[in-house]
Amino acid sequence: MKNELLIRVLSSITIIPIVLFFIIKGSFFFIFFLIVFFLISSIEWFQMNKNTIYKYIGSFFLLISCLSAFYIRGDTAEELNFFLFIILICVLTDIGGFVFGKIFKGPKLTKISPNKTYSGMIGGYLLSIILVFVIFSNENYELIKKFSELSEIKLLMLVFLISSISQVGDLIISYFKRQSKIKNTGKIIPGHGGLLDRVDGIIFAIPFSYVLLKFI
């Protein structure tokens, strides 16, 4: 168990800076990153759903998610901060769910994913919402100018919605893994599994956020 945790931590320390490099650099670098991401995630999805019609539907959705990421990231500092804001909400939702679920345990959320608990769900919301208060208390809040005219309540609602979609996305991928009788979607990330195992919530939160952005 300790060795597995160590591998997970080392993988994260290695991968996160690389991913941030491509996201922050933007332009050709980000396009290259999205193409590689789409190819790897599509392969994992096809392998997981090789005998069902969902392999085509899922691949198309991954394409939509990548295109949404491209348009949200844009080429300005505002758009970069907004994109990172969305990613951070998803990551904190995932971390909150894992930590609170392990500490408080309690009733299972659904049979789709036996490891998910109500305490984990609440923890995911709590940790991501704390982010809002950190942002509002920071004098550099104006960095995310797309939110500068939103009240605290509206921003909290936005974070809650993105966190909810992230958690739903996690459950959807878990459902397909359960249907395919596999634990992980792949082995590309040591200690974590496949690419889809790590970004299950993000690939759903990105297109949803793109729609929200258009309406906001």
Image (cartoon, helix red, strand yellow):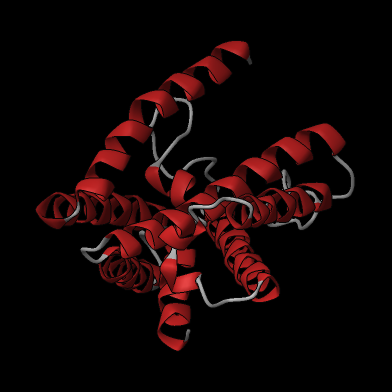
Give the number of callouts.
0
Which residue is at the front of the view, 157 or 106? 157
User: Measured along the vertical axis of the image, is residue 114 above or below residue 188?
Assistant: below
Q: For the point 64% across and 75% down, which residue is it?
A: 151
Which residue is at the front of the view, 123 or 138? 138
For the view shown, which residue lies furthest in the bottom direction? 215
Q: For the point 32% across and 58% down, which residue is it?
A: 80
Which residue is at the front of the view, 148 or 44? 148
User: Measured along the vertical axis of the image, is residue 75 above or below residue 95?
Assistant: below
Q: Name the spot of residue 85 as percent of width and height, x first.
A: 47, 56
Q: Name the spot of residue 64 as percent of width and height, x first.
A: 31, 73
Q: Is residue 139 left or right of residue 189?
A: right
Which residue is at the front of the view, 213 or 180? 213
Q: Quadrant of residue 102?
A: top right
Residue 188 seen anywhere in this rendered image of the structure? no
Q: Is residue 153 left or right of residue 108?
A: left
Q: For the point 58% across and 54% down, which residue is it?
A: 135
